[in-house]
Image (cartoon, rainbow, N blue to C red):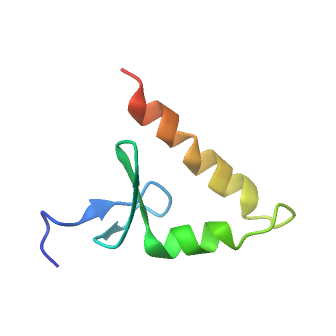
C-alpha cells in the first residue's frame, strides 16, 4: 500500500485506502460496514456515535 494513498480512519485509527471521505475525515470500509449494521441497542453504538462526533471537530477552525 502506498503511504500517500492511505488515510487514517477516524473510527479505528488504522490506515487504509478503501473507505469513504466525509468532509475532511475518512472512515475505512470495514468500520463503515460495521457501523451501518450496528443496532441502536448494541453496546458498540455509543462508541460509533462518539467517533463520528470527530466529523464536526475536523471541520471547525
Position of the C terminus, as image quadrant, is top left
Rendered view: 5 above or below 55: below
Q: Is residue 49 above or below residue 45?
A: above
Residue 2 location, quadrant? bottom left
Is 3 on the left-hand or right-hand side of 36? left
Question: Could you tell me residue 57's position as x and y percent?
Answer: 47, 32
Which residue is at the far bottom?
1
Q: Is residue 56 left or right of residue 39?
A: left
Please provide percent x and percent y for residue 39.
Answer: 80, 67
Residue 7, image x, y percentages: 28, 60
**Who's the residue at 87% across and 64% down the image?**
41
Give the number of marks.
Answer: 0
Q: Is residue 55 left or right of residue 26?
A: right
Q: Is residue 31 left or right of residue 42?
A: left
Nearer-the-camera pick, 22 or 12: 22
Q: At x 72% / y 64%, what residue is drawn? A: 44
Tell me if residue 59 comes above or below residue 12 in the rendering: above
Front one among 49 and 22: 22
Q: Residue furthest top?
A: 61
Residue visible at 39% across and 42% down? 23
In the picture, which quadrant includes the N terminus? bottom left
Q: Nearer the viewer, residue 44 or 32?
A: 32
Q: Residue furthest right?
A: 41
Q: Which residue is rendered at x = 70% and y = 74% of the image? A: 37
Amino acid at each position: 500500500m502506498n503511504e500517500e494513498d492511505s488515510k487514517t480512519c477516524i473510527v479505528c485509527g488504522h490506515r487504509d485506502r478503501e473507505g469513504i471521505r466525509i468532509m475532511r475525515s475518512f472512515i475505512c470500509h470495514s468500520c463503515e460496514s460495521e457501523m451501518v449494521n450496528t443496532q441502536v441497542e448494541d453496546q458498540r453504538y455509543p462508541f460509533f456515535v462518539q467517533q463520528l462526533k470527530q466529523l464536526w471537530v475536523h471541520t471547525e477552525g
